[in-house]
């Protein structure tokens, strides 16, 4: 039985709590939040105890795993404290706010012999997993161009921490990092990025932020990534990948979200290649956490390595720097930490 201390009782903490409640070999023993009343509500739903500090939870419960759903600005402190107690860490994305912090977190867990598992949840969405399979099977030939879209309401978080870039990293680090990570996994390391940002965050205007980034991969593939906080419609994601032999499309607003379009004489539509409708299915957060539990039990290798999370952070930071300077940024390949 894995004993987990869950840090955070906000939206993401509650999402993780709901997933843990369905996993048979996990016991959440503590919920930690500076808002004790909120922590108590989530703790009660899991048969856990509520704490207002991580130190108290570590001393009292001796958890084997710390699941960090606290703001990104706190990730390094949490990971280093957990590692010093010999606890594994599940850490919500993005890994950190800076590369120095990310390297330090990886080094702390390596020195302690503990796991650092980064929750890049898009890798666990069934539709994105299916896209990966089709690309690797060569269903569209050699990929050339990819566009990725992610848009939804502007999150606030307790105390408005999402709107404070010093705590969340902004739209490039917190939202677009999902698609940066996915593109790097499919098409390899990035060589160069150019990005723009349109944002309003004044007291007299509705907050809005839209980032757009064009990424050139060393493989030759070009990825275009758009992320929007403040989109007036429903939360939407989309992917389109053009290859030398066809087109893959995924859009959450379509009745058939996942489509493979291959130009052949035999078919004038995509009906020649039947694909399942993957809009529904199992909760990807549950899939992700169940996978992490398997990793901790030695039943699987991690689908997300911390070095890959660091690569996604590097690209997100370069995109943010490009938007700030209106200049393309080269991505320097670094040795894995």
Image (cartoon, rainbow, N blue to C red):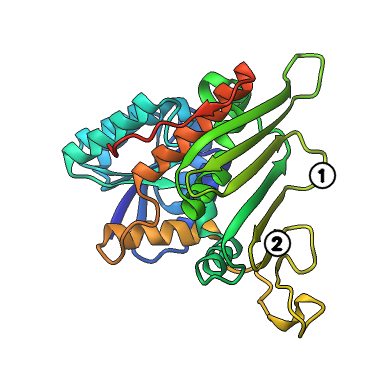
Give the label on residue 107, or none. none
Snapshot quadrant of residue 12: top right
Q: Position of residue 151 (x, y in %)?
A: 71, 42
Snapshot quadrant of residue 171: top right
Residue at the image point whose x is 36% and y is 31% from the top: 102
Q: Position of residue 97 (x, y in %)?
A: 45, 26
Q: Is residue 21 visible?
A: no
Residue 314 vertical placement versus 203 (above, below):
below
Residue at the image point whose x is 59% and y is 72% from the top: 139
Q: Considering only order in the chain, which callout, 2 or 1, is on the residue closer to the N terminus? A: 1
> Can you tell which of label 1 and label 2 is closer to the viewer?
2
Determine crowd level at label 1: few under 14, some 14-19, many 20+ residues with C-alpha closer than 10 A.
few
Q: Is residue 246 visible?
A: yes
Residue at the image point whose x is 49% and y is 47% from the top: 184
Q: Position of residue 262 (x, y in %)?
A: 70, 73
Residue at the image point whose x is 59% and y is 20% from the top: 164
The residue singled out by tag 2 in the image is 249
Task: Determine whether the residue tagged by mark 1 lies in a helix, strand or loop.
Answer: loop
Determine crowd level at label 2: few under 14, some 14-19, many 20+ residues with C-alpha closer than 10 A.
some
Give the label on residue 233, or none. 1
């Amino acid at each position: 039985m894995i004993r987990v201390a869950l840090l955070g009782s906000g939206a993401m903490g509650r999402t993780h709590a709901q997933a843990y409640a369905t996993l048979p070999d996990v016991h959440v023993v503590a919920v930690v939040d500076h808002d004790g009343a909120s922590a108590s509500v989530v703790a009660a739903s899991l048969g856990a105890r509520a704490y207002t500090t991580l130190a108290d939870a570590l001393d009292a419960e001796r958890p084997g795993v710390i699941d960090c759903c606290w703001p990104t600005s706190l990730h390094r402190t949490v990971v280093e404290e957990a590692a010093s107690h010999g606890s594994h860490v599940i850490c919500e994305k993005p890994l950190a706010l800076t590369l120095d912090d990310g390297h330090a977190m990886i080094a702390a867990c390596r020195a302690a012999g503990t796991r650092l598992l980064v929750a890049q949840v898009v890798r666990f969405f069934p539709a994105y997993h299916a896209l990966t399979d089709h690309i690797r099977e060569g269903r569209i030939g050699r990929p050339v161009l990819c566009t990725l879209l992610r848009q939804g309401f502007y999150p606030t978080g307790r105390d408005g921490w999402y709107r404070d870039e010093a705590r969340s990293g902004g739209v490039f680090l917190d939202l677009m990092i999902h698609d940066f990570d996915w593109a790097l996994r499919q098409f390899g390391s990035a060589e160069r990025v150019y990005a723009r940002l349109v944002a309003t965050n004044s007291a007299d205007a509705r907050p809005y932020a839209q980032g757009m980034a064009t990424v050139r991969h060393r493989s030759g593939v070009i990825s275009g990534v758009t992320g929007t906080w403040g989109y007036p419609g429903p939360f939407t994601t989309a992917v389109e990948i053009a290859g030398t032999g066809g087109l893959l499309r995924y859009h959450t607003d379509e009745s058939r979200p996942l489509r493979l379009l291959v130009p052949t004489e035999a078919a004038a539509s995509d009906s020649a290649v039947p694909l399942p409708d993957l809009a529904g299915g199992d909760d990807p957060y549950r899939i992700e956490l169940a996978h992490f539990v398997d990793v901790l039990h030695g039943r699987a290798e991690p689908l997300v390595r911390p070095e890959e999370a660091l690569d996604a952070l590097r690209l997100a930071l370069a995109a943010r720097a490009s938007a700030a300077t209106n200049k393309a940024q080269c991505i320097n390949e670094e040795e894995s930490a």
